[in-house]
Amino acid sequence: MQKAIPYMHFRGGSSKGLYFNAADLPSDPEIRNRVLIAAMAGVGGNDGRQIDGLGGGDPLSSKVAIVSRSQRADADLDYAFVQVVVGGNRVDTIQNCGNILAGVVPYAIEAGLVTAQAGQTRTRVHMLNSETVCEVVVQTPHGQVRYDGDARIDGVPGTAAPITCNFIDVAGSTCGALLPTGHPLDVINDVEATLIDNGMPVVILRAADFGISGYESCDQLNANAALKQRLELIRLQAGKMMGLGDVADKVVPKMCLVAAPRHGGRICTRTFIPHVCHSAIGVLGAVSVATASILPGTVAAGLAATLVDGSSTISVEHPSGEFSVSLEVDRSAAFPEIKSAGLLRTARLLSKGEVFVPMSVIRDPL
């Protein structure tokens, strides 16, 4: 016997995942997580292919959004992000995902949780993973979500309607402080690092300190076993320094190798999430790196190109293009204070229907 659960499948930014109404999932977190693993990867063993579920066998396509009307007075929706770990029968709920966030309001409109307005719909989304709020602006001509348009984001073919995400007060959302150690620069295993959390915990390191250029392809970096081993040893120590505890089984912090930009951006990046090189860069990871590039004394600031006077837009280069982050910065204090970060994303509804999971997943432990 199987249980049918309504879902929608969206591409959000350069990721894609399953979107659920919280009311359609078990209220018990442990049972809910078993259901999500079964929906994405299947039952009886997850070898990384996710052949018995709806997942794509890649961290970027093994994601879940759980959405409901918000319980907060200052928000319209509650959004919980769940990363179903590829190759492991477990989930990770520590981090946010800004890419999947891009599909939350379109999903909520399609599911009847939010009423679309004429022209565009502004919705405040409470991100449960970090207890922060983001204003999401979706194009809704004639009271319907518009998916086609002229906006282009790297990592996604073609164009689509723009979705604006204005992140408010996300500094330290996971670690408790923008710079969790209190320093723009730390040394771990004789390597200088910047540990930062402006919506996503990230460890920023110079690529040159590992004997590489920082311009290598993802395939080249993924094949470099010695590099990945060194990064993991640093990550394990950085996790404790950032207040995240033992991160051996966690997907944060992300590891980001930086180099001077080559294509007109502010900084060049190669990001690991956490052990596989990302073909682009995560939304909130880009915010953290962009922030580091303007803070004095950080690893990124030492390599970053000079900003045009008065510009608030920072272009973060990555393997498949660039990611633009617009930062609102208060420079009146001795150390710059980040007030908000604005990002352009797109999303598209791919399918909707029911996903079937065995009743044994709900009744009995796996």
Image: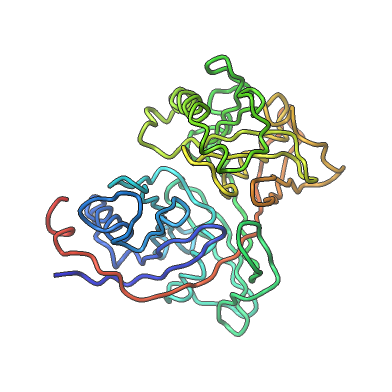
Residue at image point 57% right, 14% down: 190
Q: Nearer the viewer, residue 231 or 313?
A: 231
Q: Position of residue 291 (x, y in %)?
A: 67, 38
Q: Nearer the viewer, residue 343 or 53?
A: 53
Residue at image point 53% right, 37% down: 172
Q: How is the image coloured?
A: rainbow
Q: Quadrant of residue 360?
A: bottom left
Residue at image point 35% right, 50% down: 48
Q: Is residue 292 left or right of residue 245?
A: right
Could one spot residue 242 in this view of the protein? Answer: no
Q: Position of residue 249 (x, y in %)?
A: 35, 35
322 above or below 107?
above
Q: Residue furthest right?
A: 309
Q: Quadrant of residue 2?
A: bottom left
282 above or below 137?
above
Q: Position of residue 266 (x, y in %)?
A: 75, 41
How many badges with numbers are in the image? 0
Q: Residue furthest bottom?
A: 142
Residue at image point 51% right, 37% down: 223
Q: Residue furthest top?
A: 190
Locate the N terminus and report the quarter of the image it occupies. bottom left
Q: Nearer the viewer, residue 359 or 115?
A: 359
Q: Position of residue 147 (x, y in %)?
A: 59, 75
Could one spot residue 101 in this view of the protein? Answer: yes
Q: Is residue 171 left or right of residue 336?
A: left
Q: Nearer the viewer, residue 330 or 314?
A: 314
